[in-house]
Amino acid sequence: MATPSTAGRPTPERIFHALNAFQQTAVLRTAIELDLFTAIGADANSAAAVAAKTGASEKGVRILCDYLTIQGFLTKDQGKYALTQESAIFLDRKSPACLASMAGFLGTERARSIFDSLTLAVRNGGSVWSEGDNTKPNDEFWVAFARSIAPLTVPSSEFIAGLLCAAEGKPAKVLDIAAGHGMYGIILARKNPRAEIVALDWPAVLQVARENAQKFGVADRYSVREGSAFETDLGNGYDYVLLTNIFHHFDMPTCEKLMRRVHSALKPGGKAITLEFVPNEDRVTPPTAAAFSLIMLANTDSGDAYTFAEYEKMFRNAGFAKTTLHPVPDMPQQVLVSEKSA
């Protein structure tokens, strides 16, 4: 059992909580599956009321809600539960910013089981998962990712659109590499009615992107190229190439190989737009970006979270004259803008 913290004196409390951290994942996933946050957001504020709305037992709901309160997802006052501001925005399905769909990817048994082999991955220097090579198609994995993660991309997508002055409405030919859900290109097209988007990904994944392009009203300016970013003809004459969350899957020589292809596909003066987790040179700050390297160690054969200096070197070797770094507000990622000489 955890020992109470004593100022200036070590306790095993951090160790206890770390070894039991899987419980937090299970609790949040369960609450999302029961639509508990939506029920409380609709004024079901007692254990009995939430139980009635979710079809769960009153005892089970009470214990679950108390745990969520301890973890900071709910508040409790005289037996009445309420959503925190964070939960109201991101976990109530009636909120336009709801991210509950992420549980369909991040909270799965598969996501957890990969980390059961972390000791082997550390010894190996890369994933021992049989599908850790992300140069090859993995439809089940990436379709699930595309359908689950899309809501999380909206702030970064809108930031990129602003960075590229999309609202000015200048003609723009855009290639979206490893498009997945397609939201980065789609948001850009929504902001700029003269933008033409070409999405590149595996065929099954592109079906999700097509659905989203139709949903958001840009299907008439949205075309696709099926296949590998390392082998498929990318086309040429692009004003912008979007590279969102792709480089961390590969080692540096492979990243350079892709970036050289991007350089050739851009017109003179064109820009490559990279969205990534970029740790500081110390590799331990900021926490979310720095910790992302562990996710890549467990999930990929050779991926990593690269520093800005490493990206600068890779992109310079690929032919880009200049790369600048732009933090995304309220998100743990940064945008790198790499310019091809005019």
Image (spheres, rainbow, N blue to C red):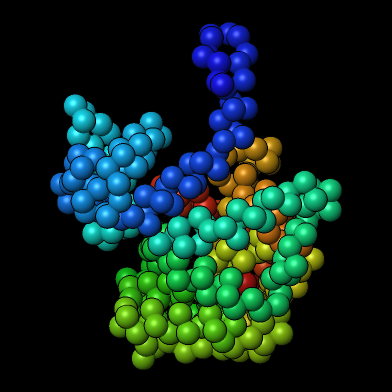
| 39 in relation to 176, above or below | above
User: Looking at this rendering, what residue extends furthest in the right direction?
Assistant: 123
Q: What residue is rendered at 78% in x and 56% in y?
A: 126
| Residue 179 in picture, x, y percent from top left | 52, 75
Q: Position of residue 48 (x, y in %)?
A: 20, 42
280, 52: nearer the viewer: 52
- Examine the image and state in which quarter residue 281 appears: top right
The residue that appears at 59% across and 33% down in the rendered structure is: 18
Residue visible at 60% across and 16% down? Answer: 11
Which part of the image, by quadrant, shows the C terminus? Answer: bottom right
* Residue 123 in the figure: left or right of residue 78: right
Residue 215 vertical placement versus 34 (above, below): below
- Residue 331 in percent (x, y) is at 45, 50
The answer to which of 158 and 263 lies nearer the viewer is 158
Q: Is residue 48 visible?
A: yes
On screen, residue 246 versus residue 52, left or right, reads: right
